[in-house]
Image (cartoon, coloured by chain):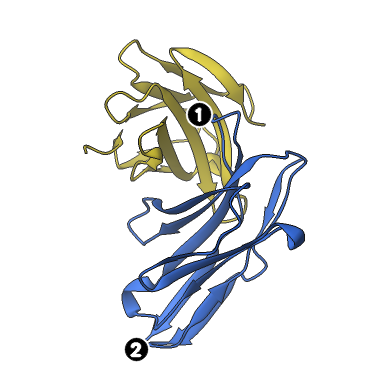
Amino acid sequence: KAGVTQTPRYLIKTRGQQVTLSCSPISGHRSVSWYQQTPGQGLQFLFEYFSETQRNKGNFPGRFSGRQFSNSRSEMNVSTLELGDSALYLCASFGSDYGYTFGSGTRLTVV
Amino acid sequence: AQKVTQAQTEISVVEKEDVTLDCVYETRDTTYYLFWYKQPPSGELVFLIRRNSFDEQNEISGRYSWNFQKSTSSFNFTITASQVVDSAVYFCALSDVDRDDKIIFGKGTRLHILP
């Protein structure tokens, strides 16, 4: 099976900028969720989309947003970047076949 | 509220030793899933196992085994005859059976297998 694809793998941004991360789920999976991983906070749930609708949202500020397209691909956007947003951002797709499958992540560094 | 606790932050063992990673969880749900994931240095979370709360049978997969005890809310993971390639961060996690929209992760245990 083709896995979950996240692009880009690495990103360096400056404080105040915005960034968009992309996630392509496993073919046929309609649920995509996003997680932020930092050394201090561990893996934290950001939000989840199913059939283009956000079903659940974690405890993150409004600077973090996302969307899902009709082909189930999802994007996550972070505006007005802060140093604390530096993290590994992981995307997971869910389907009854393979359950949760995670991508390799996008490592964002804010300088 | 749901919570997963992995009390062991870091463990080091010599190759070929057995090692057990502890996981304790809290949930008010009567039905739930428990997971273990492995995260190698590449960053990807590799799925190891999913266990339904109804199924308390222990499971063995090669050198890996899992001990699920509902009475103590624990879901421990044992690696037998460890190998250097087992070095990684291991995460225990929990989700609601009826809602597949998010997983609650523990903080992870970093496992070092020394040659």
Query: What colour denotes chain A?
Result: yellow
* Residue named by callout 1: A16
Percent of width and height locating residue A17: 45, 27
Percent of width and height locating residue B71: 76, 60
Residue A87 appears in the rendering = yes
Q: Quadrant of residue A73?
A: top left
Residue type at mark 2: give it: Pro
Instruction: Please identify the quadrant where the N terminus of chain B is shown.
Output: top right
Which element is circle 1 on? loop
Q: Nearer the viewer, residue A55 or B41?
A: A55
Q: Nearer the viewer, residue B51 or A38?
A: B51
Residue at 48 percent across and 85 percent down: it is B13
Instruction: Please identify the quadrant where the C terminus of chain B is shown.
Output: bottom left
Res. B115 mark: 2
Few, some or many C-alpha atoms within 10 Å of disc 1 (few <14, some 14-19, many ≥20)?
some
Residue at 58 percent across and 51 percent down: it is B55
Residue A47 as seen in the image, left or right of residue A20: right
Percent of width and height locating residue A12: 36, 41
Residue type at mark 1: give it: Gly
Q: CA distance from mark 1 to mark 2?
A: 45 Å
Residue at 78 percent across and 41 percent down: it is B28
Residue B106 versus residue B9 in the image, above or below: above
Residue at 72 percent across and 40 percent down: it is B30
Query: What colour denotes chain B?
Result: blue
